[in-house]
Image (cartoon, rainbow, N blue to C red):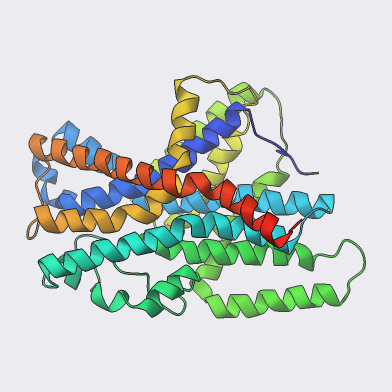
């Protein structure tokens, strides 16, 4: 039996909202620091406690994506499993739900990114960040070759890092192709396990899995294992022992593991990513221990509010920040002194406001668009 049939109205839902919103915020903060501040190695000898805190808090950017993968596996994978077991799952409704969720935000983000990048190239040329002058892990490739209509179409069809590069300066779009193909692969995996005898449907679904894995390549396929960690949480027991204490201890342990991975960076990047995936799955499982009812307090409102525009924040922030970076730091990045920390903090707040406004016009309307599509095509 599957646990967690419905989290709506529970404190667990608020916890997961905060994880989702926090992961998007971590990605944005990492890019913000890398674009405007020098690397920590250039200030380590003279760093103050404030500077150390700034670099620690902004050091989780890449790992925020691993958290997204695990959380997506839990939520999307759980919906597939429940629909399959209840006999209510269908490709038509599932595809509509997933594509409207992705496209309602992605297509405007691609258009806005094109505007930011074309304006940046027109004003600043291609000798700086738009030409691929590396700034840590941001701005490491030339933007003009990535602004073609073919590349934009490839990103809209989730073919980035498969047939095309990511569009323009918007590097975070790499993870959307991963997510999309996981959305395709997981139902195929579920359908490949027959409820009765093995039939031709089983063979066809299994064949489709092998074809897709070959098409998307080894790296996207490898990280599917992290996504599957989230899906596996749906089979975990919903309650055990004294849940109040258990989830606190497990959540603390998961956070400690994540910090340890980031601090010591053992092995390869993939090794660290998988450890963070395991820690994230543990954290999510632990947070699900809280079965109290949600409240309308500050925590609940903050968690829901941040999660409500997390996807928009993730896919829209970088082209705008790169343009601002080209304006303010055309050559050497800043030292993290008090004045510049205040400036970058203000830029971060403005970036959140920018994404929030875009989300009100896009992400907030996902449900309405989905309902309209279902009504027009008579899906059920």
* Residue 42 position within the rendered picture, expressed as x and y whole percent measured from the top left: 11, 51
Q: Quadrant of the C terminus?
A: bottom right
Q: Residue at x 57, y 63 (%)?
A: 224
Please name whichever residue, 239 or 212, is drawn nearer the observer in this view of the structure.
212
**Spot occupied by residue 344 in the image (x, y as percentages of width and height):** 18, 42
Is 207 on the left or on the right of 153, as rendered? right
Residue sticking out furthest to the front: 376
Q: Is residue 94 left or right of residue 217?
A: right
Q: Nearer the viewer, residue 361 or 287?
A: 361
Question: Eyeballing the image, is 151 above or below 330?
Answer: below
Please tell me whether residue 380 is drawn above or below residue 160 in the rendered image.
Answer: above
Q: Give the residue displayed 42% in from the left and 40% down from the top.
A: 22
Residue 41 position in % (x across, y down): 15, 51
Can residue 253 be seen here? The reply is no
Judging depth in this view, the residue of 88 and 256 nearest the camera is 88
Report the residue at 31% width, 45% height from top: 354
Nearer to the camera, 295 or 30:
295
- Name of the residue lying farthest toward the right: 197
Question: Residue 360: where, in percent of width, then height?
Answer: 43, 43
Q: Residue at x 71, y 67 (%)?
A: 188
Numbered label tally: 0
Q: Quadrant of the N terminus?
A: top right
Does any portion of residue 16 appear in the rendered image? yes
């Amino acid at each position: 039996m599957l646990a967690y049939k419905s989290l709506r109205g529970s404190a667990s839902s608020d916890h997961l909202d905060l994880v989702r919103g926090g992961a998007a915020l971590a990605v944005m903060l990492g890019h913000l620091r890398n674009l405007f501040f020098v690397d920590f190695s250039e200030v380590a000898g003279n760093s103050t406690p404030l500077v150390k805190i700034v670099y620690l808090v902004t050091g989780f950017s890449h790992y925020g994506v691993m958290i997204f993968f695990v959380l997506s596996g839990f939520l999307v994978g759980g919906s597939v499993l429940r629909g399959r077991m209840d006999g209510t799952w269908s490709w038509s409704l599932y595809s509509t739900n997933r594509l409207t969720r992705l496209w309602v935000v992605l297509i405007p983000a691609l258009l806005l990114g094109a505007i930011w990048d074309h304006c940046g190239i027109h004003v600043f040329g291609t000798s700086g960040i738009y030409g691929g002058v590396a700034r840590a892990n941001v701005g490491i490739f030339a933007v003009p070759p990535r602004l073609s209509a073919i590349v934009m179409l490839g990103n809209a069809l989730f073919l980035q890092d498969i047939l095309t590069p990511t569009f323009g300066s918007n590097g975070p779009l790499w993870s959307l192709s991963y997510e999309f193909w996981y959305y395709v692969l997981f139902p195929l995996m579920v359908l490949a396990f027959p409820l009765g005898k093995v039939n031709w449907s089983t063979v066809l679904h299994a064949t489709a899995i092998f074809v897709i894995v070959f098409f998307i390549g080894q790296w996207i396929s490898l990280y599917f294992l992290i996504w599957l960690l989230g899906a596996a949480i749906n089979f975990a027991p919903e309650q055990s022992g004294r849940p109040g204490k258990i989830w606190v201890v497990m959540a603390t342990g998961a956070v400690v593991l994540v910090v340890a991975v980031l601090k010591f960076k053992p092995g390869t990047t993939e090794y660290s990513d998988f450890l963070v995936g395991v820690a994230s799955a543990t954290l999510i499982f632990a947070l699900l221990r809280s079965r109290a009812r949600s409240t309308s307090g500050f925590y609940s409102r903050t968690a829901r509010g941040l999660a409500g525009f997390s996807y928009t924040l993730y896919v829209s922030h970088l082209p705008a920040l790169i343009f601002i970076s080209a304006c303010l730091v055309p050559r050497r990045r800043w030292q993290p002194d008090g004045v510049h920390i205040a400036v970058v903090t203000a830029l971060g707040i403005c970036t959140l406001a920018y994404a929030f406004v875009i989300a009100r016009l896009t992400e907030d309307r996902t449900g309405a668009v989905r309902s309209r599509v279902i009504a027009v095509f008579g899906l059920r």
